[in-house]
Image: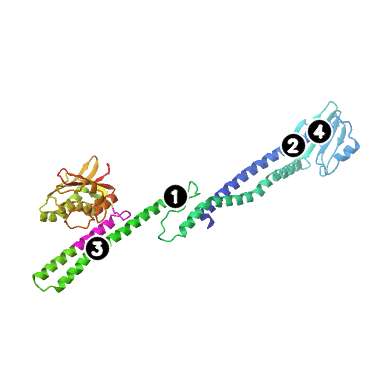
């Protein structure tokens, strides 16, 4: 049973079953064919014996002795046209003679408890009948037929052994791949060997190598992310430690209140950074992405409501255009976080007017944020999606993770992010799905 769980065992079992059925079919056909040919040969011998005796007179004594040999399977009888029996042989066990009225040609008779094959021939002077027991004919024919299929039966085990060996040789490259995969340590993500693989297996190994390459890229990205996150967290944590020391050393009064305010601000910035790191981790490729039915217009209203207090404090005019429901399947939390980051960036980086839209353009759902701020230079728009990348010459506080979170969340939801120049003079950021989404 264990052997049938292997590919080699299954292939061998199938081929063995096919070979057995084929051998039985060929053997059966050969057996039937050889028996038929043997019957034709025996009939030919009957006819030749009868024709060789039809022109004789009386049978000579030496010929009679040969025909009377008990080992001779044939019965020979010769009559004259007047009905005079010129010769009659009768082997042991035959109690009745052949009938005097001969049937010319081939016929079958039942005499002395057994069946006979008879051939009769006549000349102007003689009538000859030659008979042979059908049992003898059948036995000889069966022996000849069995001898013809014995080579097939002898060759079958050798063919089975050869098939087993050939299957092993054919699957040897797959065994090498399995051995190469089984002997690797956990951090080895280089490609498995593909040399010599059969065409049916090569695509599977190529797909597995592609998976290993993606895993290697993901692990490198994660290692880089952890290193960058550790570097970014070190600064606010060090600042918190210093501010805590200042708070401990400050005297009660305005100085202590100022230290407490700075410590609270530092804690808020650290919490914000950790939240953004967690949001980015949730939006990474391969992370679980729960989907449900949602309304993009409602997501936009929630994101605007989240940023509205910050916009009010900064004196930014924040408007929303969501004229109709936009049903979609996706993760509402990820989309809300992505849109909130776009609006938050526009408010923080000097815009005085921010317009948010949730609409359908060219048959595709679309989230759009326009502002009249300083924008992003064309040559820097690709780099701003990198982690911890902040705009040059800006004084606004931030971690440089906002647009990275937006891009990761959009990709996770099957959408894309595009930056362009806004009609308001600043930056236009769009999260757009494919048509029909």
- Foreground residue among 26 and 75: 26
Which circle's residue, 4 or 1, is located before the other in the chain? Answer: 4
Please tell me the numbered disc located at residue 150.
none
Closer mark to the observer between disc 1 and disc 3: 3
Residue 158 percent location from the top left of the image: 63, 50
- Foreground residue among 335 and 223: 223
Separation of marks 3 and 2 at Cα, in angstroms: 102 Å
Residue 352 percent location from the top left of the image: 12, 50
Please tell me the numbered disc located at residue 204.
1
Q: Residues within 10 Å of mark 1 (few under 14, many from 20)?
A: few
- Foreground residue among 278 and 260: 260
Please tell me the numbered disc located at residue 41.
2
**In the image, farthest residue toward the left:** 254
Above or below — where is 247 with respect to 411?
A: below
Question: Mark 4 — residue?
Answer: 50
Separation of marks 1 and 3 at Cα, in angstroms: 42 Å
Q: Which residues are magenta?
A: 269-290
Above or below — where is 419 with respect to 40?
A: below
Asked if residue 100 shows in the view, the reply is: no
Separation of marks 2 and 1 at Cα, in angstroms: 60 Å
Which circle's residue, 4 or 3, is located before the other in the chain? Answer: 4
Q: Secondary structure at mark 2?
A: helix
């Amino acid at each position: 049973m264990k052997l049938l769980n292997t590919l080699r065992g299954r292939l061998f079992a199938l081929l063995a079953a096919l070979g057995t059925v084929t051998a039985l079919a060929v053997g059966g056909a050969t057996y039937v064919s050889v028996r038929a040919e043997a019957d034709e040969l025996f009939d030919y011998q009957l006819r030749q014996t009868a024709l060789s005796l039809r022109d004789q007179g009386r049978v000579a004594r030496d010929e009679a002795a040969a025909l009377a040999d008990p080992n001779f399977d044939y019965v020979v009888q010769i009559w004259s046209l007047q009905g005079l029996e010129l010769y009659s042989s009768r082997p042991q066990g035959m109690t009745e003679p052949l009938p005097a009225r001969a049937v010319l040609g081939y016929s079958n008779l039942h005499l002395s408890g057994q069946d006979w094959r008879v051939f009769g021939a006549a000349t102007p002077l003689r009538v000859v009948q030659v008979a042979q027991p059908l049992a003898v004919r059948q036995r000889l024919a069966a022996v000849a037929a069995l001898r013809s299929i014995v080579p097939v039966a002898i060759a079958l085990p050798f063919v089975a052994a050869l098939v087993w060996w050939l299957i092993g040789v054919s699957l040897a490259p797959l065994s090498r791949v399995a051995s190469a995969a089984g002997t690797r340590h956990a951090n080895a993500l280089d490609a498995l060997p593909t040399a010599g693989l059969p065409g049916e297996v090569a695509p599977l190994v190529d797909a597995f190598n592609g998976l290993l390459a993606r895993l290697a890229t993901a692990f490198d990205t994660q290692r880089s992310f952890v290193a960058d996150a550790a570097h970014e967290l070190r600064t606010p944590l060090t600042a918190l430690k210093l501010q805590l020391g200042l708070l401990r050393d400050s005297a009660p009064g305005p100085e202590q209140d100022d230290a407490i305010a700075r410590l609270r601000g530092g804690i808020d910035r650290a919490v914000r950074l950790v939240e953004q790191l967690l949001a980015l981790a949730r939006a990474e490729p391969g992370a679980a992405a729960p989907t449900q039915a949602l309304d993009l217009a409602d997501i936009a209203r929630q994101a605007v409501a989240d940023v509205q207090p910050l916009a009010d404090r900064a004196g930014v005019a924040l408007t929303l255009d969501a004229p109709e429901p936009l049903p979609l399947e996706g993760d509402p939390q990820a989309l809300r976080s992505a849109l909130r980051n776009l609006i938050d960036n526009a408010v923080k980086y000097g815009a005085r007017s921010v317009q948010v839209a949730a609409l359908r353009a060219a048959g595709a759902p679309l989230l759009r944020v326009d502002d009249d701020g300083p924008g992003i230079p064309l040559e820097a728009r690709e780099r701003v999606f990198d982690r911890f990348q902040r705009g040059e010459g800006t004084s606004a506080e931030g971690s440089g993770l906002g647009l990275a979170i937006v891009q990761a969340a959009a990709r996770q939801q099957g959408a894309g992010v595009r930056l362009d120049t806004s009609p308001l003079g600043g930056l236009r950021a769009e999260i757009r799905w494919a048509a029909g989404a």
